[in-house]
């Protein structure tokens, strides 16, 4: 289950943006282990948005999921990788107060040991990308 690294509460109070790191495979192919995310805290949500939320049963654990639909009592969220689990099929709807923010941008850190200009150019071309609700929506969400 992706788990963004915790950020400081003070930084979040000053700016509505923060940085998180993905760990785990549940958002593959949209997000991969090690990806860094720019999170817009308090943003308005739409179906298909990728969000950072507190796990309903372990609130010290942050997870990244995609908003599938609005239901009574909160949001139904799904991971893009149906085989990884750890989404609303396991814990039900997520209340509004547990959804922290929307993922706006994804970037991949540069792998160590890449020295050739071709490898660096290839990394630079694919490293940073905005995360849209309509363009990066998973097959799982579209099949609903």
Image (tube, rainbow, N blue to C red):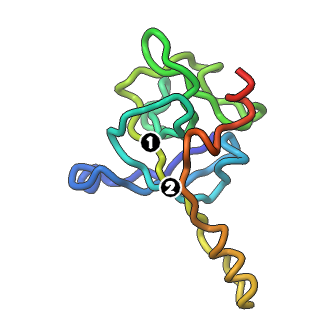
| Rendered-image quadrant of the C terminus | top right
Answer with the quarter of the image where residue 121 lies: bottom right
Q: Mark 2 points at which residue?
A: 105
Number of residues whose C-alpha sits closer than 10 Å to that of mark 1, classed few (under 14), some (14–19) or many (20 or more): many
Secondary structure under the numbered disc 1 in the rendered image: strand
Q: Name the residue under label 1.
A: 102
Secondary structure under the numbered disc 2 in the rendered image: strand
On the image, the x and y values in percent for residue 28 come to 71, 46
User: Looking at the image, is 90 positioned above or below residue 43?
Assistant: above
On the image, the x and y values in percent for residue 30 come to 67, 48
User: Looking at the image, is 99 positioned above or below residue 5?
Assistant: above
Q: In percent of the image, x 71 and y 84: which residue is there?
A: 114
| Rendered-image quadrant of the N terminus | top right
Q: In percent of the image, x 65 and y 19: which residue is there?
A: 89
From the viewer's side, name the closer residue of 18 and 117.
117
Verify CB contact (< 8 Å) between mark 1 and mark 2. Answer: no
Alpha carbons under labels 1 and 2: distance apart: 9 Å
Q: Is residue 32 left or right of residue 58?
A: right
Number of residues whose C-alpha sits closer than 10 Å to that of mark 2, classed few (under 14), some (14–19) or many (20 or more): some
From the viewer's side, name the closer residue of 73 and 22.
73
């Amino acid at each position: 289950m992706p788990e963004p690294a915790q950020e400081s509460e003070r930084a979040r109070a000053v700016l509505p943006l923060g940085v998180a790191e993905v760990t785990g495979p549940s958002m593959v192919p949209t997000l991969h282990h090690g990806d860094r995310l720019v999170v817009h805290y308090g943003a308005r949500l739409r179906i298909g948005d990728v969000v950072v939320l507190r796990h309903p049963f372990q609130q010290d654990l942050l997870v990244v999921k995609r908003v599938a639909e609005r239901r009574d009592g909160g949001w139904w969220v799904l991971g893009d990788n149906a085989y990884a689990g750890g989404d609303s099929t396991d814990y039900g709807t997520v209340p509004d107060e547990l959804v922290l923010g929307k993922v706006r941008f994804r970037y991949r850190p540069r792998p160590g040991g890449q020295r050739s200009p071709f490898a660096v150019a290839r990394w630079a071309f694919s490293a940073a990308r905005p995360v849209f609700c309509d363009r990066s929506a998973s097959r799982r969400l579209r099949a609903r």
